[in-house]
Amino acid sequence: MNFKVFVLCFIIPKQYLNKYYGCPKDNCNLFVLKDTLKKMQKFFGLPETGDLDQNTIETMKKPRCGNPDVANYNFFPRKPKWEKNHITYRYCLCFAHT
């Protein structure tokens, strides 16, 4: 494998997944890399194989805004999306006593 293929197949995807999906820089083994690739593929509506196929590479090459696709929500760990779409609310008119 030449250096260009190594960079294209391993270094660039790893940097991409770190920047946009929080894949850890230091502890990115094959299992973590495949799991993060599946998240990326799911986000873009690609088949969730965990493999670095041509469609995934082409998606990674597209221009980006620079913001991550997934976020670490501190208020709701591991649950960034609301479970319910129907909301209920109430308001009341309160008058200050003077």
Image (tube, grey):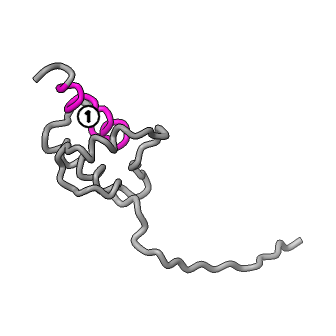
Q: Is residue 50 above or below residue 19?
A: below
Q: Quadrant of the N terminus?
A: top left
Q: Is residue 78 above or below residue 20?
A: below
Q: Position of residue 67 (x, y in %)?
A: 46, 41
The quadrant in which residue 5 appears is: top left
Q: Nearer the viewer, residue 89 or 62?
A: 62
Image mark count: 1
Q: Amino acid at mark 1?
A: Lys
Q: Secondary structure at mark 1?
A: helix
User: Would residue 23 appear left or right of 27 to someone viewing this image?
Assistant: right
Does the magenta portion include 20? yes
Residue at image coords 33%, 40%: 60
Q: Nearer the viewer, residue 75 or 42?
A: 42
| 70 part of magenta stretch | no
- Residue furthest right in the image: 98
Q: Which residue is mark 1?
A: 14
* Quadrant in the rendering for residue 81: bottom left
Quarter of the image where the C terminus is located: bottom right
Horizontal side of residue 18 vs 93, given as left or right: left
User: Which residue: 18% across, 49% down?
Assistant: 50
Check the image and report above or below for 52 versus 91: above
Quadrant of residue 42 within the rendered picture: bottom left
Label 1, residues with CA under 10 Å away: few <14, some 14-19, many ≥20? many
Span of residues in magenta: 5-24
Residue 54 percent across, percent down from the top left:
23, 43
Instruction: Tell me the residue at 28%/30% (across/down).
Output: 12
In the image: residue 6, left or right of residue 60: left
Q: Is residue 97 left or right of residue 37?
A: right
Q: Residue at x 26, y 47 (%)?
A: 55
> Magenta residues: mostly which secondary structure?
helix
Q: Residue furthest top?
A: 3
